[in-house]
């Protein structure tokens, strides 16, 4: 499970930290996915006068926060209801944020202090200063003015904190013993107590280390997989105090769990084609510290991104990260945890969890299989990039063309090599093709050309075959050479179609055209392309296209299309037009028409449209006859 992997990372981090002060373990990086961000610090000066301090507001100090210095601001996320744990919080609505800080957080923190230590006296002095309306308004207005002048992106990625100048020295929150105590207490106490409810068990097996422990906590999971602050979200007859029964975690594991979680969030969080995920490494042997450290350092290095001038991440080329992981040996495996995060509560909703994915699996999916299928001549110079011809090559972006709405299912099936239904594929292909066809009829904007969609579908089909998630039909006997009728005259008509090229295409695409009935459907599509091109040339429009019913083709409609297309071609060019190709269709379509009874409409539609779009492949260059495909 990913929990054991996270704890393994936390245990490694704990050993690495050595004698570091315990409270520092519970300070969080406010924006772990940014290398640098703003921390807006309101600076107060405290002056000692005999037995008490006086306070004055000095200025607003915008500072750069990052992974190396974030601890001094002592940020720790609290609840959406009660605010964050210390005075450090995310910048935002100043009226609301500053009012909460003065009215709630100061009072709550000071109410827990029975001592009159020096740092507590500092906080009381600042609080008394801010309770005076004129002081409150002055500080608020300065913060508001600064906030309004921030760039739009920084308004949502900046923090707010306090510092105190005492005897000429600036002190940050993490330097105050009272703040250290609160961080330590929150990091341990809130594992059993939240929402004014105590959830704690005794003499119970910990769900992480599987050892019997004297005390286990009910709110110790650092990842909020589920909501437990509302009745009905926990077991035990809606009693939140029984949440420890759902997920009991002992004290030692809870600390390691949190440290591991912080490391994963800070260093191993990334995106896969727009989907957030954590990549959590685990060694084959649980206590293999050397290989775990090697895996963590390697992944951290791979996941590091270069910041631009504004401190924003530069997008990594799709699939390149996965190719780098593929270069590693199988001394570790990865749990890929794909999730969606609630922006308010920060609770994550797990979409899929893929466990024990070894680098060799990445190698198969992102290096070996693409290298084999990218060699198809069909993909050479198939696309245009900046008005230059380029090869179509595999990436998950192409797969996403057909799985935009259920991309998580695609990820799971591909990474785990789970079987795909061929009918599902045909349905996906035709949904995109039909949608684009309809858009083309009603929109002047860019719509992906059908021939490019067919090429992507062709590549997708071959990729799935290559990685073994679909198995093509057993190849039936295909007559690659068709004997021409000696009695047919008008050789110029016979030569206008390059039948040898079609036969070679069929031979080279056995996995795509793996049965005679598919070749037959495909050839009817080519025939219709011939007709449409003739109509476009002679009539300047294509009235026959209306008979295609928006690419909703079934077996009966396909037979009618074939008959009517032959009739129309005969009207335009004579009965013997394309006679060699007509015999090819008779061999593969008419003689196998009975097989269409068990074929889905999506499969028929797909191979028919594929024939229309690949029709331009079989033009005889020696004959002035246009077989080019349409957009």
Image (tube, helix red, strand yellow):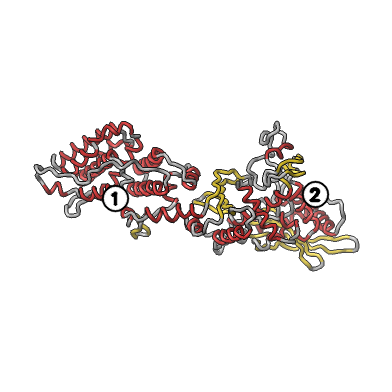
Using the image as rendered, state which of residue 559 and residue 321 is in the foreground.
321
Residue at the extreme right of the image, as rendered: 50
Disc 1 crowd rating (10 Å Cα; few below 14, some 14-19, many 20+) is some
Q: Quadrant of residue 45?
A: bottom right
Please state the horizontal and vertical placement of residue 540, each as a whole percent of the image: 22, 45
332 to the left or right of 62: left
For the question of whether residue 352 can be seen, the reply is yes
Q: Quadrant of residue 214?
A: top right
Which is in the foreground here, disc 2 or disc 1? 1
Using the image as rendered, state which of residue 142 and residue 438 is in the foreground.
438
Disc 2 crowd rating (10 Å Cα; few below 14, some 14-19, many 20+) is some
Using the image as rendered, state which of residue 448 and residue 200 is in the foreground.
200
Q: CA distance from mark 2 to mark 1?
A: 77 Å
Please state the horizontal and vertical placement of residue 79, each as a whole percent of the image: 70, 46
Q: In what element is the residue under mark 1?
A: helix
Residue at which label 2 appears: 107
Q: Which residue lies at the image location 56% right of the left edge and 64% below the top edge?
A: 309
Q: Which residue lies at the image location 78% right of the left edge and 55% below the top edge?
A: 134
Please determine whether, in this image, residue 240 is positioned above or below residue 6. Answer: above
Residue at the extreme bottom of the image, as rendered: 168
Using the image as rendered, state which of residue 580 and residue 383 is in the foreground.
580
Q: In what element is the residue under mark 2?
A: helix
Q: Which label belongs to residue 125? A: none
For the question of whether residue 129 can be seen, the reply is no
Whether tag 2 and tag 1 are in contact, CB under 8 A, the answer is no
Please state the horizontal and vertical placement of residue 157, each as a whole percent of the image: 62, 55
Task: Please report whichever mark, 2 or 1, sits nearer to the chain's N-terminal start.
Answer: 2
278 to the left or right of 440: right
Q: Which label belongs to residue 508? A: 1
Q: Which residue lies at the image location 54% right of the left edge and 60% below the top edge?
A: 302
How many labels sit on residues?
Answer: 2
């Amino acid at each position: 499970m990913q929990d054991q992997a996270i704890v393994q990372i936390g245990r490694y981090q704990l050993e690495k930290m050595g004698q570091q002060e315990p409270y520092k373990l519970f300070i969080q990086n406010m924006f772990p996915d940014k290398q640098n961000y703003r921390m807006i610090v309101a600076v107060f000066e405290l002056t000692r006068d005999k037995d008490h301090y006086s306070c004055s507001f000095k200025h607003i100090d915008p500072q750069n926060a990052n992974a190396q210095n974030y601890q001094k601001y002592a940020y720790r996320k609290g609840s959406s209801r009660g605010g964050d744990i210390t005075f450090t919080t995310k910048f935002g609505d100043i009226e609301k944020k500053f009012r909460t800080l003065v009215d709630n957080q100061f009072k709550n923190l000071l109410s827990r202090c029975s001592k009159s230590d020096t740092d507590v006296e500092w906080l009381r002095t600042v609080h008394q200063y801010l309770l005076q309306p004129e002081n409150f308004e002055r500080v608020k207005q300065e913060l508001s003015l600064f906030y309004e002048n921030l760039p739009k992106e920084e308004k949502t990625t900046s923090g707010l904190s306090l510092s105190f100048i005492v005897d000429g020295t600036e002190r940050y929150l993490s330097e105050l013993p009272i703040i250290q105590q609160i961080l330590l207490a929150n990091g341990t106490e809130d594992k059993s107590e939240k929402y004014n409810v105590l959830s704690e068990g005794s003499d119970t097996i910990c769900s992480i280390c599987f050892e019997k422990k004297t005390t286990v906590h009910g709110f110790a999971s650092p990842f909020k997989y589920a909501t437990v602050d509302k009745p009905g979200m926990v077991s035990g007859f809606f009693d939140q105090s029984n949440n420890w029964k759902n997920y009991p975690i002992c004290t030692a594991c809870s600390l390691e769990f949190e440290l591991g979680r912080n490391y994963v969030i800070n260093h191993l969080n990334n995106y896969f084609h727009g989907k957030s995920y954590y990549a959590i490494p685990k060694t084959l042997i649980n206590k293999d510290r050397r290989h775990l450290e090697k895996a963590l350092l390697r992944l951290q290095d791979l996941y590091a991104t270069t910041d631009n001038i504004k401190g924003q991440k530069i997008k990594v080329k799709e699939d390149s990260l996965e190719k780098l992981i593929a270069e590693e040996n199988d001394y570790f495996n990865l749990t890929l945890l794909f999730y969606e995060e609630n922006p308010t509560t920060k609770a994550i909703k797990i979409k899929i969890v893929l466990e024990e994915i070894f680098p060799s699996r990445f190698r198969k999916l992102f290096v070996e299989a693409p290298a084999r299928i990218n060699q198809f001549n069909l993909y050479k110079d198939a696309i245009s990039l900046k008005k230059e011809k380029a090869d179509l090559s595999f990436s998950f972006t192409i797969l996403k063309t057909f799985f935009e709405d259920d991309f998580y299912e695609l990820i799971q099936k591909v990474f785990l090599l789970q079987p795909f239904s061929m009918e599902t594929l045909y349905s996906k292909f035709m949904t995109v093709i039909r949608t684009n066809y309809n858009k083309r009829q009603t929109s002047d904007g860019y719509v992906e050309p059908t021939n490019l969609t067919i090429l992507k579908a062709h590549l997708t089909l071959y990729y799935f075959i290559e990685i073994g998630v679909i198995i093509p039909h057993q190849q039936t006997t295909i007559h690659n050479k068709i004997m021409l009728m000696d009695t047919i005259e008008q050789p110029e008509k016979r030569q206008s179609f390059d039948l040898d090229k079609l036969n070679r295409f069929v031979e080279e695409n056995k996995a795509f055209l793996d049965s005679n009935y598919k070749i037959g459907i495909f050839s009817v599509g080519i025939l219709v392309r011939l007709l449409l091109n003739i109509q476009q040339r002679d009539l300047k429009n294509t009235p026959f296209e209306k008979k295609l019913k928006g690419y909703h083709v079934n077996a009966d409609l396909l037979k009618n299309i074939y008959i009517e297309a032959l009739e129309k071609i005969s009207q335009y060019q004579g009965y013997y037009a394309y006679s060699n190709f007509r015999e090819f269709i008779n061999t593969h379509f008419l003689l196998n028409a009975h097989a269409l009874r068990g074929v889905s409409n999506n499969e028929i539609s797909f191979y028919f449209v594929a024939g229309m779009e690949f029709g331009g492949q079989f033009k005889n260059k020696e004959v002035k006859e246009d077989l080019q495909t349409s957009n």
